[in-house]
Amino acid sequence: MSRPVDYSLYLVTDRSLALGRGLVDIVAAAVQGGVTVVQIREKGAGTREFLALAQALKALLDPSGIPLIVNDRLDLALACQAAGVHLGQEDLPCDLARRLLGPERVLGVSVSTPEEARQAEAAGADYLGVSPIFVTPTKQDTPAATGLAGLRLIRAVTALPLVAIGGLSATNAAEVMAAGADGIAVVSALMAAADPRKAAAELRGAIARSARRP
């Protein structure tokens, strides 16, 4: 990577939760509230629509230096010159993705066990998405909840940044950070929020409180 990434508040998009609002508008408000990374994850979008959305988000985020990460689609990450790509366990192999991305772009990998974490780190991942921490209705294709205990086990085997996801909110963000996460990723907590800016600010406040704990 060309520069360190602040993973503390990581927004994953999902227009199905947007309540009829525009994706760019929601992301803009969330960024004003303190989001530090945005991942575009729009499973229902065709290739050209996805590319157009990614380009619009990149144009929004670039002036503030906030990285845009593309979910799954390495080809589209390269096409829109995104900061990087995030892969699941059934996606393109991590070592191949690293070769295609080159050393400058960010490569994230979803893991749920210490062994998956070790493998991803060895294959060139820059950060790990640990999921799901708690049960969540947002994604139905995930393994059993990792829980805080599982997060601690993964923390013990890798020095890579860990981004926790799955059922997270301002009420549990602090305990997740205390268990070893470097950041929290949210979908519905921001995409479905009546006021995404305020919701993001509340999440950042919870993260900051965890950092002040002894």
Image (cartoon, rainbow, N blue to C red):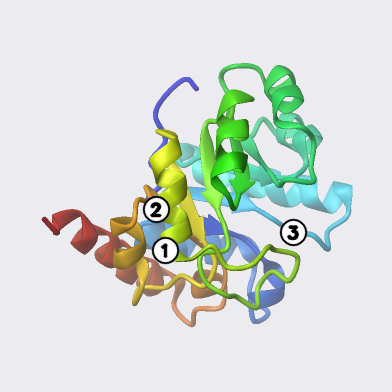
Q: Amino acid at mark 3?
A: Glu
Badge 2 crowding class, 10 Å Cα cut-off, few under 14, some 14 to 19, many 20 or more, is some
Give the side of residue 176 with respect to residue 138, left or right.
left
In x, y percent, where is residue 151? 45, 55
Classify 125 as above or below 214: above
User: What residue is shown at x 78% (from left), y 41% (from top)?
Assistant: 73
- In the image, what residue occupies the spot 44% across and 35% down? 158
Residue hosting label 2? 152
Q: Tag 3's secondary structure?
A: loop
Question: Circle 1 is placed at which residue position?
Answer: 148
Find residue 117 and report its horizontal and vertical position in percent.
Answer: 56, 40
| Disc 1 to disc 2, C-alpha distance | 6 Å
Label pair 1/3, CB-CB below 8 angstroms: no
Q: Disc 3 vs disc 2: which is toward the camera?
A: 2
- What residue do we see at 57% from left, 75% from top? 135
Disc 3 and disc 2: Cα gap in Å? Answer: 30 Å
Q: Amino acid at mark 1?
A: Leu
Tag 1 and tag 2, C-beta contact below 8 Å: yes
Where disc 1 sits, the SS reads helix
Give left or right: position of 198 versus 116: left
Q: Amino acid at mark 2?
A: Arg
**Which sits earlier in the primary sequence, circle 1 or circle 3?**
3
Numbered badge on residue 42: 3
**Mark 3 neighbour density, 10 Å: few (under 14) some (14–19) many (20 or more):** some
Q: Quadrant of residue 146?
A: bottom right
Mark with earlier residue (3, 2): 3
160 and 50: which is toward the camera: 160
102 shown above or below 140: above
